Image: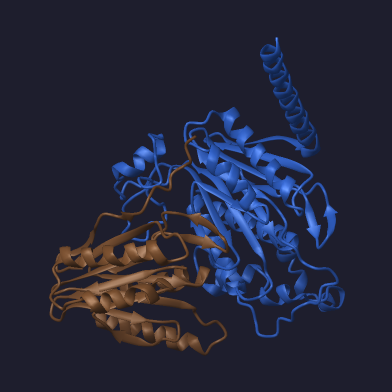
Amino acid sequence: MALEDICSIKDISVYHKWFSSSSWEDTVSPLQMTDYRKCGLTGGGPLHFFIPTTHSVTVCRPFTLSHGTTTLGFIFQGGVIAAADTRASAGGLVACPHVHKITPIHSHLVVTSSGSGADCMLWERILTREIRLYQLRNKRRLSIRATAKLLSFMLHPFKGTDVCVALTLCGWDKEAGNTDCATTPQDSSFLTGHSASAAVCSQHDTTIGCSASPNNGPHLIYVCSDGARLEGDVISVGSGSPYAYGILDGGLNWNLSREEAISLAREAVFRATHRDAYSGNNVDLFHITAQGWKQREREDLRDEYYRDMERRAKAVERKIDTQLTVCGQKLG
Amino acid sequence: MEYLLGIQGKDFVLVAADNVAASSIIQMKHDYDKMFKLSEKILMLCVGEAGDTVQFAEYIQKNVQLYKMRNGYELSPAAAANFTRKNLADYLRSRTPYHVNLLLAGYDDTDGPGLFYMDYLSSLAKAPFAAHGYGAFLTLSILDRYYKPDLTKDEAVGLLKKCVEELNRRFILNLHSFTVRLIDKEGIHDLEKITIGTKGPITA
């Protein structure tokens, strides 16, 4: 993709013979060297090029598209946890049992994907490219919130088409906070984690004025091809998300330790994969802190299932034992 | 699903919006703010299709601010409302219509308070009170019954609370918290959020 653009391969007369243009290709004018000078935008506006034309044809797929997945992310005192299953389904078929649904974008940002696998893979690459270009042009990294907004605006022209992408950006902003914006006491208490209930937690989507939250710290933002862009503390996406929410809402609080948080995320994905047919196989887990992201070894949930069964069996045994002893005492 | 309410008093406008951001059957956020500040004395409340709301509202917001930058003075609420309606109308018969329902509330130094009701078909009406969403079916009659043109601020908040109580009793969805703001000649003021029950983490 990038090499193609730089080599101006689309200029070759035989290009269109070799590579039949997909509907997406047509909508994007190649990012050739000349375009930067022509468009006159100093920052380089990616939006300029993403305008779908009327002749984009809906391709007829030989398989049914299914959005089966369980991905989740949450913020706690130790950073951000991102977890996802690894099953890619196409209708009733497990197309691939070991997909990577969590992709690092840069050292402090990972993105979990849900929806159409191909679309997600593509848009992750596009996002990585745009973030890297911004970093090279402006000598600083784009904040997580700005990344989410950029992605949302890039996806907007494709609203109403078959593009199906639901990404959760999980990351940590490291740059010094914006000194113009005053910090409200609510926000600073949230970031240092003093018992933040939902009523007190200010929402980071500041639509009123400029004030409020500094950029520093962990962020969790959901971006969807419908156009939704939501920042939150707990986000779960996919067909298995209701099941995951059930576990997360009951066990989550700010003061979890790292091990507890990881175990909660694993449990949530495990329970979701148990109930949801379209999620399963393994669980991937990422932990993002101020030092960057760390990936945990991929774990097969089948083992977790057998361990859970054993635990239940043992619990039943113990229950029968206590009942027997009680009976024994009564009789004796 | 979503609920917006606006009540115009003698020299102020009271607006309220629910705080739920939902995706099919899941509440993804419990503290989502649906109000967009267009200028020092104009608020726009925007609900509708997922991406359209934020895109359209931010577009209007930036354009209103641009007008101020270019001309040195702010658009009046009526002008902003008509500008918004024009944009909705222009996009209505394009390939990408915006499916958004709006309430625009503002205070004009010459004309006083104003509340404008707009819907996705780009109809515009200046109204003393207005509501959007399924909740409107339940609450408009209450507003009809108890509204007076010279409401004081406390009376207006009381009326708002009556509406919220009715929603709590009869509306099938649980809208448990509402952002409330008041616009008067001093500007936009945040009032206390109206909450029904708690939505924090479930403690064992």
Can residue A46 be seen? no
- x, y percentage for residue B117? 33, 80
As displayed, is residue B35 above or below residue B113? above
Residue at image position (32%, 77%) is: B140
- x, y percentage for residue A315? 71, 26
Which chain is depicted brown? B
Left or right, residue A97 beside residue A25: right
Residue B116 image-quadrant placement: bottom left
Query: Which residue is most to the front?
Result: A331
- x, y percentage for residue A122? 71, 61
Residue at image position (81%, 63%) is: A91
Can residue A324 be seen? yes
Q: In this orientation, which residue lies closer to the viewer: A113 or A121? A: A113
Q: In this orientation, which residue lies closer to the viewer: A52 or A302? A: A302
Left or right, residue A218 beside residue A260: left
Q: In this orientation, which residue lies closer to the viewer: A287 or B167? A: B167
Q: In this orientation, which residue lies closer to the viewer: B121 or A273? A: A273
Left or right, residue B157 beside residue B22: left
Q: Name chain A's colour.
A: blue
Left or right, residue B39 beside residue A13: left
Residue at image position (83%, 52%) is: A96
